Image (cartoon, helix red, strand yellow):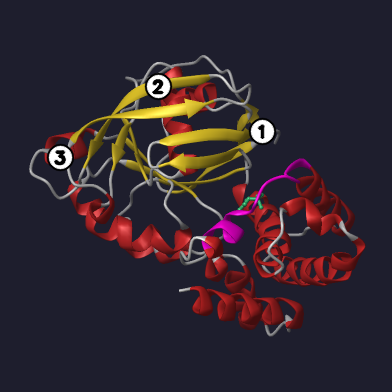
Amino acid sequence: MSPQISSVNQTDSPQPSIAIVGAGAIGQLLFHQLASAGQAPLLIGRQQASTDNRPTLLQFTDLKGVPSTRTAQVIIPNSDEAQADLKHITLLIVCVKAYQVIETLKPLLPRLNRECQLLLLHNGMGPHLALAPYLNGRTLCLGTTSQGALKQQRWQVRQTGAGLTQLELFSGPKLTQTTKTHLLNAIPNSQWCSDIIPMLWQKLAVNIAINPLTAIYQCRNGALAAPQYRHTILGLLDEVILVAQAEQVPLAREPLITRVFDVIHLTANNFSSMYQDIAHRRPTEIDAITGYLIQRAATHGIPTPHNQAIYQQLTTLEQRSN
Ligand code: PAF
């Protein structure tokens, strides 16, 4: 079945009431895109990062360098004032890092309406499985985006790339057509897919090939096009292909290699998110990227020496930088 592309018009229910938790670069980019489409989502702050329930001015620079500002309502989930707002949310877009998904959602889910639907958008895989016991039949959608954004200050982001965004229902009741339409119209170059898992594996492969290497060799994505990295990248990808196949997700080798090198060229000037996490002494998403592959490989008895070596190097670097 071919994916459903942006700009659909059918409506069958009231406009969704959307909130975003995780106002990092991608969370704020989506805030601006949804607000431009006519409905600014609520932002849910995480307590340690925010102190107040108040309107906040968000600055945005688009791909052409055009600046704009918008006011967002930022709420702190465990404050009394937030309770009514939280009950009103019909779709929560979760843009926190993979390792923060469970710790963010576990206390938040009981405060949300039973019908509130969830959409996870993060690098890596794994939280969608760990989240299952907490969902209580709620809708869980998964997505992956290749849009690029850079957080310049706490409430200031710049869009750096206009990649594809792919979304799909993973479990629970379907999203209403109105909600789908709203998302697809607001997010440029977005698609509703018929099977998101292969898309997530392809993005996982891109992240496995690029993120740890840029952090270990302290380089921009584009540097990985140099011949000395090719052998390592192909070794990492061959292991991804074997594990994905064991997971019933066939990934064709040549198109996958082409995709990875396309991303390296298209994002040549970017510092990957893992490079930035190491540079800013933050925890990385290595466990949801290389770690997820190694863990799935172990359940199938598949050796992953290339990925294990990279995992070892990256976690040593992470420990040293923290
Ligand atoms: O994590 C990242 O930085 C991005 O997913 C990607 C695609 C590697 C581009 O920098």
The part of the chain drawn in magenta is: 266-277
**Sequence order check: which comes first, mark 2 or mark 3?**
2
Q: Secondary structure at mark 1?
A: loop
Identify which residue is drawn at 76% across, 78% down: 306
Q: Give amino acid for label 3.
A: Ala
Q: Is residue 158 above or below residue 299?
A: above
**x and y percentages locating residue 152 in the rendered image:** 48, 40
Closest to the observer: 280 or 289? Answer: 280
Is residue 298 in view from this perspective? Answer: yes
Between marks 1 and 3, how big is the CA–CA gap? 37 Å
The residue that label 3 is drawn on is 82
Closest to the observer: 23 or 108? Answer: 23
Relative side of 75 to 120, left or right: left
Mark 3, residues whose alpha carbon is within 10 Å: few (<14), some, or many (≥20)? some
In the rendered image, residue 267 lying in the magenta stretch gets the answer yes
**Sequence order check: which comes first, mark 1 or mark 3?**
1
Is residue 177 in view from this perspective? Answer: no
Q: Which mark is on residue 69?
A: 2
Asked which quadrant contains residue 107, the reply is bottom left
The residue that label 1 is drawn on is 3
Q: Secondary structure at mark 2?
A: strand
**x and y percentages locating residue 28 in the rendered image:** 43, 36
